[in-house]
Image: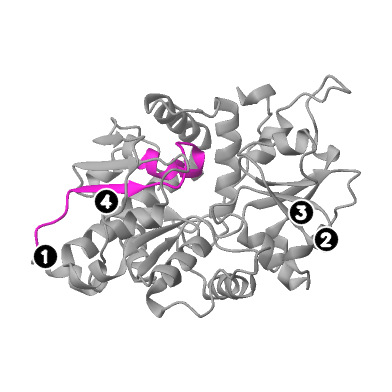
Amino acid sequence: MRLSTRRGLAALSVAAVAALALSACAPAAEDTASGDFEPITDIKLQLQWLPQAQFAGYYVAADQGYFEEEGFDSVEIVPSGGDIVPQDALVAGDVDFAIAWVPKVLGTLEAQGVELTNIAQVYKKSGTLQVSWADSGIDSVADFEGKRIGSWGFGNEWEIFAAMADEGLDASTVSITTQDFSMNALLDKDVDAAQAMTYNEWAQILEVVNPDTGELYTPEDFNVISYEDTAGAMLQDAIWADTARLADDPAYADAAVRFLKAVIKGWVFARDNPEEAATITYDAAINAEAAFPVGPTHQLWQMNEVNKLIWDGSEFGVIDQAAWDKTVAGALAAVNQDGLELITEEPAESAFSNEYIEEALAALKEEGIVVDGEYTPIDVVLTEGGQ
């Protein structure tokens, strides 16, 4: 079944305001069938960044009415510009679900002694890159020693340290340099290698005119290290819920499954209709008056690259034990330049669960929706500034 019918915008309020999270978790999936509760109809979802195609599936689910189909009257999608830590918002009880990278949440769980559960692993691969100039001599993580390695911080740096640990590199031998969320640090040669995401900053630098040629930079102008090809690769965008509330509140567990059903349909639509999904997300960013709206061409690049991270032929959102174990191993091995560790012990078993996503997938498969398809990439021609 192809999800392509456009619907009116579901009751969606996109708040650019900081939103902290709604704690709690829900009971086992089998308990949701009892119906002995008042269904939750209003929820909040905390994103980890601004409106962009990284989160297209959620905006599409609102635009196409999928949340309404699953019994929600209002779904508030709350962006963050770095001022809100999604898992902290969830722990605080101001949102119901949150999107966050797995290693960042693992650090929070250990540091704060709280419990959250990954109920859907949206991205199956790491999209993190380290980009340097072609003549830099930086061809692998082993070449980081003595170099200025750019990172945004905010927990985005742990893949770097995990990959370095696997190479036996002491983090103190590398100058970890804070860069902003652009590629200016590399362009200005303030860093030797800049952190980038396949779907964002990598495109940003390819949208810049090379002053030597008068044309846009090309991939051949750079060396690119993909953390997916290293031991440092960690699971990224996942949907998190409050563990205790899942266990204690049947209505919340039921809402989690219904929410996942709508989200899956949103991402299926984005898989099958990348151009329209990119436009929906771009419009959402404009309507939200995002501080730095990503241009339409850049949004389409993002949509194309994000789909590659999600659709690998396996079922949407199911957490692969081997990928989880690799992430945990990397998190345990990572030590930053100050000698601090991300985590020191294995996370609790409650840190992830496939039962809610599997219930949602089973229901959608009965409706004939293909939830395990692969993505056929499209050609996206970048333009200056991504406009």
Q: Amino acid at mark 3?
A: Ile
Image depth: mark 3 or mark 4 in front: 4
Query: Which residue bears the numbered disc 2?
Result: 145
- Of label 2 and label 1, which has the lower sequence position? 1
Q: Mark 4 belongs to which amino acid?
A: Asp
Side (left or right) of 310 relative to 61: right
- Magenta stretch: give its range: 37-61
Q: Earlier in the sequence, mark 3 or mark 1?
A: 1
Residue 46: give x, y in percent of width and height: 36, 48
- Looking at the rendered structure, the secondary structure element under dot 4 is loop
Q: Which residue is mark 4?
A: 94
Query: Label 1: which residue?
Result: 35
Is residue 249 highlighted in magenta?
no
Separation of residues labelled 2 and 1 (CA atoms): 59 Å
Which mark is in front, 3 or 2?
Answer: 2
Q: Amino acid at mark 2?
A: Glu
Dividing the picture into quadrants, the one containing residue 368 is bottom left
- Report the Cα–Cα distance between label 3 and label 2: 15 Å
- Which residue carries the number 3 mark? 225
